[in-house]
Amino acid sequence: MVPAPLAYAQSVSVVARGNPWIVRGKALATMTLLLLISFSPSVAWFVSRQYTHWQSDAVSPRRAELPPPPALTVDLSRRYAPQLARYERRLDALKISAPRRSRLVEEHFQLYRRAHALFGAAQAGAMLGLIEAETRNQEIALGRRSVFSSPEAALSNVERWLTFSAVALLEQQQVERRELSRRLRALAPVPLAPEVVFVHARWIKRAASVTGLPPAVLAAVVDTEQAGARVAYGLSGALRTFTDTAALRTTQMYGRSGLTGELSKTVGLTQMSWQDALGQQNRLAAMNAQLGVPFPANEAEARALLSRPYANLLLTASRIVGYLNYTEGLGANSVVAHTSAQVYYLGPGWHNNPALASSGQTWPYAWNAFFKACLYERLLR
């Protein structure tokens, strides 16, 4: 005789399988989830954590220490002092207690020294600037977006990124790129798509050279936009490709994408919108950049062009340069190169959310992209 609870569960299961509304509801829920994954790196990041234990290609993390911090010198201390003063002002605004403040300042300094050894002075300084912005944005009264809920959480995440980067650079010296990609995906603090970046490295470097951006900035954008494609056994990436193709075909047939365009607002490696692509003609002309085909004149041509990796990267880089020109008070079509370490954060930030970037807010996309860019600068050499 079947126990009552089991019999009840079996009967519910049979009813669910036989009820078309329940079946349709499950299908709709699944499609909704995949759509969210496909078009939102943040959602993809969260969902990917649920799939971690299903990944058959996971490897065990290697233990590696951060590189030894550089010796304390007058020059290093002089560079750190202004950063410390700004950080302490942010802690004051959060009304941090004296013992807690002392611990935070000590960890802040140690992270700077280690980042200095790993990434160099410029990027270590930019990292402290990002930490300062994040700490400021944690002040509730300001009503700003922040990545973490406390200064401790922010510094802990920085330490994770530095440790992972140290491991990645060690692995780079010991394994070939396919194996390196596999290990990076398994060990990273957030989902990565290094295989996509490595495959398109030549185009990334070329587009960056033409537009005056660090290649690592474009690499970080590509990685962040493509990292969700492997979620749910690659179904999210397949769904994104399907909607992009459907929108392109509809546009080619009818002149505009209509409803399919609502599901495919961004296209290609960097998920750039076709509307933004159409706005890059004058800047690309000023840069003497060549797309290889006439500049697109409508949605269909823009979508088709964005499906080509190099053109996609070139148009994306041009758009980022336009935002950076605006930030620095330059002309819209200025061809001045943007190579400062701050661009490693600002570039991906402007690409993803100009409203948040322009108001100095911090959010996961731009935060993680900064550390990815610092790492890819070395992995792409």
Image (spheres, rainbow, N blue to C red):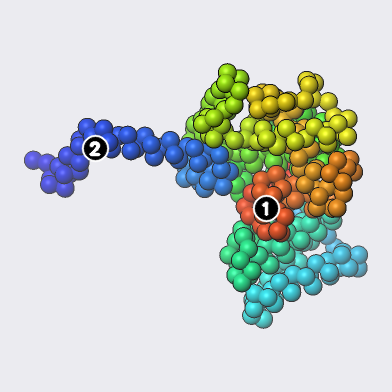
Residue 81 occupies which quadrant of the picture? bottom right
Residue nearer the viewer, 10 or 333: 333
Give the residue drawn at x 75%, y 57%.
Answer: 127
Q: Residues within 10 Å of mark 2 (few under 14, many from 20)?
A: few
**Residue sitting farthest toward the front:** 255
Residue nearer the viewer, 81 or 56: 81
Image spot of residue 22 (x, y percent):
28, 37
Residue nearer the viewer, 378 or 303: 303
Type of amino acid at the residue the image marks with label 2: Ala
Give the residue drawn at x 58%, y 18%.
Answer: 253
Give the residue drawn at x 20%, y 37%.
Answer: 15
Q: CA distance from mark 1 to mark 2?
A: 45 Å
Type of amino acid at the residue the image marks with label 1: Ala
Is there a contact, CB below 8 Å, between mark 1 and mark 2?
A: no
What residue did someone put label 2 on?
16
Image spot of residue 13 (x, y percent):
22, 38
| Res 355 label | 1
Q: Is residue 11 depicted above or below 311 in this figure?
A: below
